[in-house]
Image (cartoon, grey):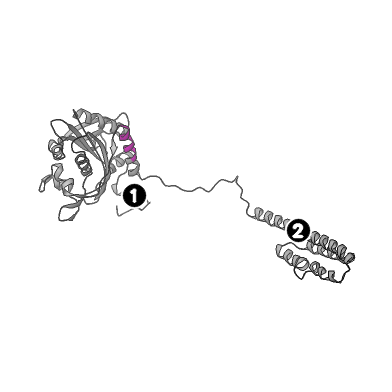
Amino acid sequence: MNEKVETLKKELKEKLEKISSLAELGAVKAEFLGKKGKITELSSMIKDLSPMEKKDFGKLLNEIKTFAEDLVQEKQELIETMIMNDKLESERIDVTLPGTTIKCGSPNMLEGMIEDLEELFLNMGYDVVEGPEVEKDLYNFELLNLPKGHPARDAQDTFYLKDDELLLRSQTSPVQIRTMLANEGKSHIRIICPGKTYRRDDDDATHSHQFTQMEGLLIDEGISLADLKGTFDVIAKHLFGQDVETRFRSSFYPFTEPSVELDVSCFNCGNKGCSICKNTGWITVGGAGMVHPKVLANCGYDPEKVSGFAFGFGVERLAMLKYGVTDVRTFYLNDLRNNSDRKDV
């Protein structure tokens, strides 16, 4: 019996030395330790032995089973380690190599301009307020001292949606009106209103049927044009540099009185005259004025107690001036080719 056990041990060792995969190991394990394996079959011999022989045989049988299981387990660990090493080698990554460069975009100029101005005004104590783009005629025109039939409406002709009472807003001034009405004339206001606006303009290099406005409103006691001028100075120097100068020119808007055009000295030629400033030395960047007493009264404020100023900029115009963009349509085109190469713009 001892000779047979030693023979099985030797046979098992030889077969385990030749295999190199878990599948082959499984086959050898079944051959020796399976239900019908060679070592398992030795158990069937115990019934023919005497009680004394059964004791010695049982001890011998346990030893060979333990021997075989340990040998198979050792071989399994060896094969698994080999497989893992091969996998690590084949999937190895050289972390010292430079990473793949991923091209990233940048914020749209208009969004960047709006965020820049919002940060400026927030630091000056203003709130950022938004409103609907689909607006009522009441808020877009009538409460702004532009009754139906008023000739000044022609300059802000927009897109009407229903019965001439529902329209796409031609300015963000309705947000100012809504804010004043919500306050019921009881509190002071300091807000800016950025957003999309719409007018029935023919698209060309300097006009678009859709554009972005940044309007502002301040209402308090004792507000004057001097406060507006100081605010405009801060905005102009922030956008175009500390050396830029500002000035007011008389103008007309139905919702402000007096009304002014906001001009900055030409940052390109230093007031000497060039193509950008049309040889005047000055560039108009927006409109403003003191809030008309009638507009204050329409929104519940007492013009005898409070006053205020309002201003508005076209964000596209500011971006065109600041970054040298020559065609407003560039902001909205998906074509990445240089406009100078195109024949349809």
The alpha-carbon separation of the residues under discs 1 and 2 comes to 73 Å
User: Relative to residue 323, is residue 161 drawn left or right?
Assistant: left
Task: Name the one closer to the observer, 281 or 179.
Answer: 179
Residue matched to label 1 = 340
In the image, taking residue 115 as reference, residue 101 lies left or right, namely: right
Residue 341 picture location, percent across and down: 35, 51
Residue type beneath disc 2: Lys
Q: Position of residue 291 (x, y in %)?
A: 17, 36
Q: Residues within 10 Å of mark 2 (few under 14, many from 20)?
A: some
| Sequence-earlier tag: 1 or 2 | 2
Circle 1 residues within 10 Å: few <14, some 14–19, many ≥20: few
Please give the range of residues in magenta.
115-124
Q: Relative to 150, does residue 20 appear above or below in the rendering?
A: below
Above or below for 106 versus 258: below
Q: Quadrant of the N terminus?
A: bottom right
Q: Position of residue 305 (x, y in %)?
A: 15, 30
The residue under label 1 is which amino acid type?
A: Ser
Label 2 belongs to which residue?
A: 75
SS label for mark 2: helix
Disc nearest the viewer among 1 and 2: 2
